[in-house]
Each structure stands twice: as C-alpha cells, then as structure tokens.
Image (spheres, grey):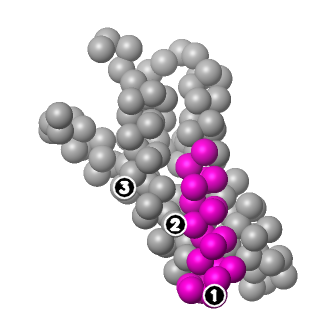
Amino acid sequence: MINRALMQKGAKFVVVGTLGFLTDAGLLWLTTHKAGLDPYSGRLVSFSMALLVTWVLNSTFTFKNREKSGKRQLGSYVTVQVSSFGLNYAIYSALVWLNWAAPLIALLIAAFISMFYSFTTMNMWVFKDAKK
C-alpha cells in the first residue's frame, strides 16, 4: 500500500538519485572527455563515486538510518547497488554498443529503469524499519 510516508521517502529518493545521477554523469563526462578513458571504464569510475554519494545521502536523508549496525547496512546497500548497477550497466552497455544512444543518453535511460528496482529493494530490505 502506498502511504504518505512511502511517498515522502520516494520523493527524497528521487532527489538523492538526481544528485547521484549528476555525480555519475559528470564524472562519466570527465573521465571520457578529459581523462581519456573509454565509456565502459569511465562508467565504472563514475558509478563508484555515485554509490558513495548516494549511500551517505540515502542513509541520513531519505531513510534516516538510526541503525547502529552501519557495516551490515552498508554491506546490504552495496549489494543492492551493485545488483542495480548490473542491470543499469547492461542496459547502458547495450544501448552504447548497438549505437542506439550516446553514453549520457544511455546513462539516463539505464538510471531511470534501475531506479525502481533500487528504491523497492532499499525500502523493503536495506532500510526496513525494525519496528515493523
């Protein structure tokens, strides 16, 4: 059931995701246009930094992490993000490889699709309220 609290978390998740996307896209552009990396290697660098940014923001802002077991939760977060990245990277790579989209457009499409998986998994597993 969708309630007000879930909608608020969803809105915050979109804000954090947007900041993560901007981190990812900005670093992807820098690594491919300024550092000379190919779009696949550049994406691995940009994703790693975006993961760190979104972990900090999601745990403190979106889901307001109060759990003392931060290492366990970080491990769960990384697991979800890596699996989400697998989905995201497969879509991104296919679009680039098939020449259906430029890297930044492919990134946008892949990010939009994987966002739904990430939010659901984080809300139901990683940051699940212990009270429920």
Task: Provide residue 60's location: percent of width, then percent of height.
Answer: 45, 36
* Residue in view at x 69 percent, y 80 percent: 97
Q: Quadrant of the N terminus?
A: top left
Q: Amino acid at mark 2?
A: Ala
Residue at image location 46% in from the left, 41% down from the top: 58
User: Which residues fall within the magenta stretch?
Assistant: 83-103
10 vs 7, left or right, is: right
| Location of mark 1 (residue) | 99
Mark in the foreground, 3 or 1: 1
Q: How many marks?
A: 3
Q: Secondary structure at mark 3?
A: helix
According to the image, label 3 marks what residue? 14
First in residue order: circle 3 vs circle 1: 3
Which badge, 2 or 3, comes first in the chain's sequence? 3
Whole-number angstrom distance, CA of label 1 to CA of label 2:
15 Å
Q: Quadrant of residue 132?
A: top left
The question of residue 99 being in magenta is answered with yes
Question: Is 68 placed left or right of 128 in the picture?
Answer: right
